[in-house]
């Protein structure tokens, strides 16, 4: 059994997108806002960031696979879940109720438990225009999932791109320990 924490516990779900290499930015921001953090990566997402650095930063194992029966839970129950970056594939499978990875199973279960969930998608314009994606975002939003634009308000550094991925937006969507003075 995992030990209880005094701080609220945030699950961070990381998907396979180039910006995931900077996931430490989100972990650091969450810790500064008084969250304890555990990271769950999609199987493909594992190749996009430094897993050892994430484990060192959080002090917890990185999760990507289901635990075996009888294996202790490495994280306490979540007070909130942040999905960043969220990919086209993850958003669509999640909205369809598919739980073929630990990350998706965690998201589906968190909804059923009433845990607040916030998402920063990292989906290009062509994929975002797909009707399945739009329907998935609509469905998840209707379920109470909070979506944010990680690029809003950022300055375009390359003259045609979207600018920096603003990790802190997912925390703003959740509120949290600082905003509420206690459990999220």
Image (cartoon, rainbow, N blue to C red):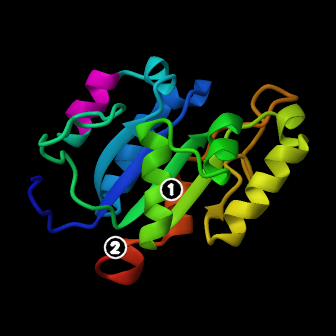
Name the spot of residue 39 as percent of width and height, x first: 35, 41
Query: Mark 2 = which residue?
Result: 177
Q: In which quarter of the image is residue 156?
A: top right
* Residue 177 drawn above or below residue 152: below
Say whether residue 128 is left or right of residue 107.
Answer: right
Give the SS element for disc 2.
helix
Residue 37 visible in image: yes
* Residue 43 drawn above or below residue 13: above
Say whether residue 32 is left or right of residue 152.
Answer: left
Q: Which of marks 2 and 1 is nearer the N terminus?
A: 1
* Residue 65 drawn above or below residue 6: above
Q: Distance between the residues labelled 2 and 1?
A: 24 Å
Q: Which residue is drawn at 53% across and 65% down?
A: 172
Q: Which residue is drawn at 29% across and 26% down?
A: 53
Give the SS element for disc 1.
helix
Q: In which quarter of the image is residue 81?
A: bottom left
Name the spot of residue 122 as percent of width and height, x first: 68, 38
Region of the chain picked out in magenta, as a range:
51-57
Q: Residue at x 44, y 62 (%)?
A: 110
Q: Nearer the viewer, residue 117 or 162?
A: 117
Q: Which of 84 and 109 is in front in this view?
A: 109
Q: Is residue 19 magenta?
A: no
Name the spot of residue 169 as percent of width and height, x first: 58, 57
Q: Residue at x 41, y 39 (%)?
A: 102
Q: Is residue 52 magenta?
A: yes
Query: Mark 1 = which residue?
Result: 108
Say whether residue 168 is left or right of residue 32.
Answer: right
* Residue 98 drawn above or below residue 30: above
């Amino acid at each position: 059994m995992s030990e209880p924490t005094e701080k609220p516990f945030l699950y961070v779900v990381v998907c396979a997108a180039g910006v995931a290499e900077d996931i430490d930015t989100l972990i650091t921001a969450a810790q500064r806002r008084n969250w304890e953090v555990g990271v769950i990566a999609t199987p493909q997402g594992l190749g996009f960031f430094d897993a050892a650095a994430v484990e060192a930063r959080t002090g917890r194992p990185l999760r990507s696979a289901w635990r075996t029966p009888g294996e202790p839970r490495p994280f306490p129950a979540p007070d909130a879940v942040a999905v960043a970056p969220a990919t086209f594939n993850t958003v669509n499978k999640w909205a369809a109720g598919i739980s073929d990875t630990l990350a998706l199973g965690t998201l589906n279960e968190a909804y059923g438990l009433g845990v607040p969930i916030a998402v920063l998608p990292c989906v290009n314009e062509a994929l975002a225009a797909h009707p399945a994606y739009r329907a998935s975002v609509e469905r998840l939003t209707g379920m109470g999932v909070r979506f944010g634009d990680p690029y809003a308000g950022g300055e375009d550094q390359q003259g045609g791109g979207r600018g920096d991925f603003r990790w802190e937006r997912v925390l703003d969507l959740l509120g949290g320990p600082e905003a509420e003075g206690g459990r999220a």
